[in-house]
Amino acid sequence: MSFEVEGKLIKKYDTENKTGTFQAREFVIEINSGNYPQAVKFQLVQDRCPLIDAFEEGEFIKVHFDLRGREWNGKYFTNLNAWRLEKPSAAQSPDAPPAGTGTGDFPSANDDPGDAGSFDDLPF
């Protein structure tokens, strides 16, 4: 299942070689969702690590990603694996928060909360 979200790139990290054959690179975007901006970390893996090089911190970006989860030694981990990065559509103003456009978007203040479960504006 894939998702997409738009936000402002606030941090990009260097590529890390996790093993001799596996590399990953993380980056963080700020998503305006309701009254509290959310800083969300994504990862790029293997040959997708250089995709973030085309973007500068402070620039708006559209991220296509998959949810990945796994168990290791009784602990559970979740990753947001980005597989495509692009500039947001020209119709999207950089100063306006992204509007909910359907499945895969994070809920915003403009979304119908009846479809998103129990959504509120608390920061935790």
Image (tube, grey):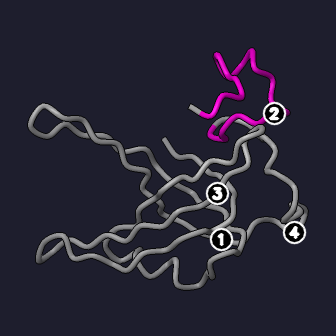
Disc 1 marks a residue whose amino acid type is Glu
Disc 3 marks a residue whose amino acid type is Glu
Residue 96 image position (x, y, % from top left): 87, 55
Q: Nearer the viewer, mark 3 or mark 1?
A: 3
Task: Classify residue 28 as left or right of residue 105.
Answer: left
Whole-angstrom CA distance, mark 2 to mark 3, is 16 Å
Residues in magenta, as a range? 104-123
Residue 5 image position (x, y, % from top left): 65, 52
Q: Earlier in the sequence, mark 3 or mark 4?
A: 3
Q: Earlier in the sequence, mark 2 or mark 4?
A: 4
Q: Name the residue that disc number 3 marks.
A: 30
Residue 60: mark in rendering:
none
Quadrant of the frame with the C terminus? top right
Are circles 2 and 4 on residues that touch, CB within 8 Å? no
Residue 35 image position (x, y, % from top left): 77, 39
Residue 1 image position (x, y, % from top left): 48, 41
2 to 24, vertically: above or below = above
| Residue at 67% across, 67% down | 61
Magenta stretch prevailing secondary structure: loop
Q: Name the residue that disc number 1 marks.
A: 86
User: Front-most of 91 and 72?
Assistant: 72
Q: For mark 2, does the 10 Å Cα neighbourhood hold few (<14), some (14 to 19), or many (20 or more) residues?
A: some
Whole-angstrom CA distance, mark 3 to mark 4, is 19 Å
- The kind of secondary structure element at disc 3 is strand
Whole-angstrom CA distance, mark 2 to mark 4, is 22 Å
Q: Name the residue that disc number 4 marks.
A: 90
Are circles 4 and 1 on residues that touch, CB within 8 Å? no
Residue 109: mark in rendering:
2
Disc 4 marks a residue whose amino acid type is Ala
Q: Nearer the viewer, mark 1 or mark 2?
A: 2
